Every structure is written in C-alpha cells, then in structure tokens.
Amino acid sequence: MTAIDIQTKYPPVRNYIAGGFVDADADYLDVFNPADGRVISRVPLSARADVDRAVAAAEKAFPVWSAMPIKERVQVFFRYKALLEKNIDELAKLITEENGKIDSEARAEVLKSAELCEFATSLPQITAGEVLEVSRGVECRVERYPVGVVACITPFNFPNMVPNWTIPNAIALGNCMILKPSELVPLSAGRIAELLREAGLPDGVLNIVHGGQQTVEAICDHPGIHGITFVGSTKVAKIVYRRGTQNLKRVLALGGAKNHLIVMPDAEPEMTSSNVVASMSGCAGQRCMAASVMMAVGKTDHIIERMVKIVRGMVPGQHIGPVISREAKKRIESYITEAEQQGAKVLVDGRGYTVPGKEEGYYVGPTLIDYVTPDMRIAQEEVFGPVMVIIRAKDVDDALGVQHRSPYGNAASVFTESGGVARYVMENASAGMVGVNVGVPVPREPFGFGGWNESKFGVGDITGRGSIEFWTQSKKMTTKWNKEAGVNWMS
Ligand code: NAD
C-alpha cells in the first residue's frame, strides 16, 4: 500500500530527522481509530536506510549537545513540560484517537509525561559526581558522560508517556536519540518532536523512525547506536535484548506482565472493590501494571459482590475505551470463552459488546470470572484486556505460591488492614513493584519503574534514579597537583 491512495483525517506519518519531517522510502500500514475502526492515517515501515539517516543526524548533533553543561540542557525540559501542560487538550485528543483510551486516561498520561520532565530538570542536582582526596595531594573524582546515540522502542498502550519515560532523562544526560514508536499509535510521537523543537531542542538530538520488526532489527544491528531501551511484550523484549546485546550494546528491555492482587478477608470492602476494578479496567486493561488475577483469600465474597456491582455499572465508550485492534478483541474474548469451557464462572461478561453508533469499534466490556484455577491459560498468560480472573486461595502463602509460579514479575499488591500481612507480601512477592491497598502500584518520580523476572531484561530501571546509570558512563579521574604527594603507590 502506498502513502497516498486514500484520504485520511491525518496525512501519512513521516519520520523526523535532523529537525524536519521526511518521507520514508517504505511500504505503509493503516492506522486505525479503535473506537470506530476507521483508518485515520498511514505509517511507514522504515528500512535500514531510514535508520542510517536518523543515526547520522544524531551523530552530527551529539558533539555539541553532549558538550553543553547539563544545567543548560535541562532548560529545554522546563519549557517542554510547560508546553505539554499548555497543549494537554490537543495531546489527549490525539492519544484518544489513535489508542482509544478515554479522555481522563489520556490526560493522566500527558500529566505523567510532565512529571517525568520534572524529574529530568532535577538531574543537575543529583548527578553532580563525587570527589575525594584519596592520598595526600591526590584526588579521585567521578564524572558522568552520555553513552552517545541511543534508541528507544515503544509499545502501543501509552503513545505519549512511554516515549517520555526515556526522552527527558536520556537527552538531558547528553545523549542523542532515535525513537521508534509503535506502528499502531504513531501520531503522538510527531507532536512530541514538534513540542521539543518549540522548547529549543537542537536539530538531530531527537529523531523518529517509524516502522515495525525490520526497523527494530536495523536499530539492534546499527553500529552507531550504543544503547537501546525497549518496552513491549516479553516475546519481543527477549528478541531485542538478545539481538542488541549480541551486537555489544547496552539494552534494557521491559516486557509483559501478569499482575496479582491478593485480597485478604479483612480488606476494607469499599476501597478494595473500587481499587481492584479500577486496576483491571483502566485503559481497558491495557496497562502493564493492570491487575489481572485476584487471589481471593478466605471469606471475600462480600468484596466480590461489590466488584460485580461496580463493573455492571460501567458503560463501555463512556467509562472504558476500546482495546487496540479487532485481533486484540478476538483474542481477549477467546480467553474468556476457553476459561468458561474449562469450568470457570463468568460473573460479568464483556464479550460481544458494541457501543451504539460505534459498532465497528473494538470494545470489550469489563469482565469478571470467578473460580478460575491456576492451571488455566487465562490465569497464566497476559490477556491485556479488561478481564479480571478470581482464583480462590486458602491463605496468604497459597496466594503467594500462585504469584511465584508466574514467569512475570512486574507488579503485585495486597489489600488488607493488617500491617504484618502487608509487610509479609511486600517482602515475599516476586515482583519489582509492590503495593499495599494500591491497585496500580506505579512508583512516582523520583522512584524508578521496572519489574522483575520476565517483565524486565537488563539492569536498572527505565525511569527515575535507576535510569541514570543506564544513560551514562562514569569516568574515574585521578589527579595529583600537589608536589607534597611525592612518589607514592599511585605514581
Ligand atoms: P509489542 O511487543 O508487540 O511491540 C512493542 C514494539 O516492538 C513495537 O514498537 C513494535 O513495532 C516492535 N515489534 C513488534 N514485533 C516485533 C518483532 N518481532 N521484532 C522486533 N520488533 C517488534 O508490544 P505492544 O503490543 O505494542 O504492547 C503491549 C505489551 O507491552 C504488553 O505485553 C505490555 O505488558 C507491555 N508493556 C510493558 C511495560 C512495562 O513497563 N513492562 C509497559 C507498557 C507495555
């Protein structure tokens, strides 16, 4: 398919290289609005030559950008943060159009991007380095230097926020970047580039190359790219981690998730039921932090009954957006059907849901399924839709046992009024982000974001302090100015 054969609401998406939008020499894919199934734009599947052009632009920009003092570099992010806030209506609308999430969720995403900038603007205060007189007249100091040209590969579920997990920190720390957004949601990236340009980011410091698998492979293989972050499914995280490190790059690859919420019988019913439902249904369940398994410990029927009531009151199209694609809707519904056939009890059924006037939209209603057993596929695999399975557990160790057998380890939470049980779960859950009475335990800045096990490959976190080591390399400097030092073991 070419870029120009049908009129769409937005013109075909273009790559952004050296401060300007350019066409790729590529095949194009349709971009859909998940709420009504309409084609709203087209996205190029860029080739190696496009990645080469972006890397050349980043390499050209790097010497000047990296030599600029960090206090000057972060000025761009003060201005960019203000622009995100000023343009939030339009940015949120774009997110809703390409991803489907409802307006309040899209706004929250932009506000989170602004918070990520807030952290980046504090980097001069927290990366000042170290210095010590290690012997008489001899000084050692450590300074941080950028890695060089780096790349960031992002998923469909947060078109604005996930690119902003990396852009502010990586660039403020002196790197130049190639962003490869998800081909399902390519529109927000162009606005990010425009706002950064308006904020004063020099040409070539951020470049965008759109595409899919072959574009990612070109990034992993490119000798001019020295670091890669990836966020997406575990299957692709493994591919990118292996291929990138095979090519001797530093790689941090965040993968998929299966997040367990342990609900104890003493949990406060109102807070617990509303938090659990918000966690499984927010962003139509398409968050890597969404709860998808509720481990109901002992007598928790009164909480489940409240959850059923809340879920029945939710209106798709109003309280919950569509999922990303027709295939995703089909896949999610088939998980529900299979669980039902295996003996689980569907308490609220979101299959076959349509929204009047948007019959072609990819809606799945919020779904609760009880009496799921840990051996069912729906209990083990990432469903990535608004579906909560309930597994009955006899005690907290039984519940933790199910959590431990999951290959993932992004998030886990416990709902209880007991401090002892809360601490026990926080210590023993096999996950990188744990919560107590919190349905979506995303750490806010300055704390870093990153899971364990097959939810993350590589060292460090993708945001916060945990990302500083990834985006920089330290230089250890030893100097001797004082002749009093004489000849010693450091000479
Ligand atoms: P995905 O893995 O399909 O795609 C992610 C990126 O990889 C996209 O840019 C895509 O173009 C590229 N890609 C796809 N297939 C590829 C291949 N074979 N080789 C090379 N590149 C390829 O993920 P998605 O469907 O866009 O996003 C949803 C997934 O992301 C879920 O699994 C979710 O849990 C995960 N996610 C994880 C986090 C986290 O922090 N751990 C955050 C957000 C999303």
Image: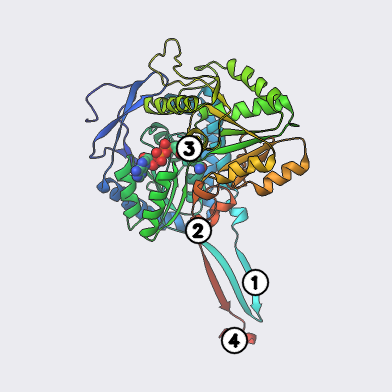
Q: Quadrant of residue 358?
A: top left
Which quarter shows the N terminus? top left
**Residue 320, horizontal then vertical, whole percent:** 52, 21
**Lower position in the chain sequence, tag 3 or tag 2:** 3
Residue in front for this viewpoint, 242 or 372:
372
In the rendered structure, which amino acid carries the disc numbered 4? Answer: Trp
Residue in front for this viewpoint, 218 or 119:
218
- Mark 4 lies on residue: 489
Q: Is residue 389 visible?
A: yes
In the rendered structure, which amino acid carries the disc numbered 3? Answer: Glu
Would residue 331 be found to the left or right of residue 113 on screen?
left
In the rendered structure, which amino acid carries the disc numbered 1? Answer: Leu
Residue in front for this viewpoint, 45 or 282:
282
Q: Secondary structure at mark 2?
A: strand
- Rounded to the nearest whole Å, what is the CA distance between mark 4 and mark 2? 30 Å
Would residue 17 be found to the left or right of residue 476 on screen?
left
